[in-house]
């Protein structure tokens, strides 16, 4: 059996996943990163994307997240997501609403920095929709 580590995915309103896994892939702000047992500790912000975890029994867990933080430690990984939804519940209508919200954020931006951040989120959401 492969080495495992504890993986937890938490949103503001609930604990979505807490179990031993063999691997995890997280959409970091600087790009996706993979984590295995014994990974070096670090902290990363996340962009909108899909968090994937492979359970010790081989089950695949996939959740759409809209930002947050990932804390990788010697004992495991904790993902603190601004919003997290199982991929099985994601559809085009949901993403369309998220894209519309992001477009409004771009339009409502108060300065160039805020506008650039909102445009980045918008483009990431559009990429996810195109991948579905």
Image (cartoon, helix red, strand yellow):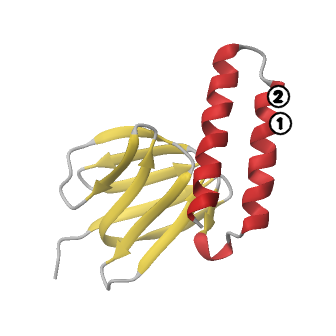
Residue in the foreground of this view, choosing between 70 and 76: 70
Asked whether disc 1 touches disc 2, contact meaning CB atoms under 8 Å apart, the reply is yes
Q: Residue at x 83, y 26 (%)?
A: 108
Give the x, y percent position of residue 94: 76, 62
- Tell me: 98 left or right of 4: right
Whole-angstrom CA distance, mark 1 to mark 2, is: 5 Å
Give the x, y percent position of residue 93: 79, 65
Give the x, y percent position of residue 48: 57, 48
Give the x, y percent position of residue 127: 58, 52
Which mark is drawn over residue 104? 1
Which mark is drawn over residue 107? 2
- Tell me: 131 left or right of 100: left
In the picture, the quarter occupied by the C terminus is bottom right
Neighbours of disc 2 within 10 Å: few (<14), some (14-19), many (20+): few
Residue 53 falls in image quadrant: bottom left
Which mark is drawn over residue 48? none
In the picture, the quarter occupied by the N terminus is bottom left
Neighbours of disc 1 within 10 Å: few (<14), some (14-19), many (20+): few
Res 83 seen here: yes
Residue in the foreground of this view, choosing between 5 and 114: 114
Residue in the foreground of this view, choosing between 49 and 19: 49
Q: Residue at x 30, y 79 (%)?
A: 56
């Amino acid at each position: 059996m492969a080495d495992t580590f504890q993986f937890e995915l938490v949103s503001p309103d609930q604990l979505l996943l807490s179990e031993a896994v063999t691997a995890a892939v997280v959409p970091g702000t600087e790009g996706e990163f993979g984590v295995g047992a014994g990974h070096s500790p670090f902290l990363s912000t996340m962009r909108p994307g899909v968090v994937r975890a492979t359970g010790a029994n081989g089950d695949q867990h996939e959740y759409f997240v809209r930002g947050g933080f990932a804390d990788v430690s010697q004992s495991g990984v904790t993902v603190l997501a601004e919003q997290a939804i199982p991929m099985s519940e994601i559809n085009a209508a949901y993403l369309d609403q998220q894209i519309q919200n992001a477009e409004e954020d771009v339009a409502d931006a108060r300065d160039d920095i805020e506008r650039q951040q909102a445009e980045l989120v918008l483009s990431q959401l559009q990429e996810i929709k195109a991948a579905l």
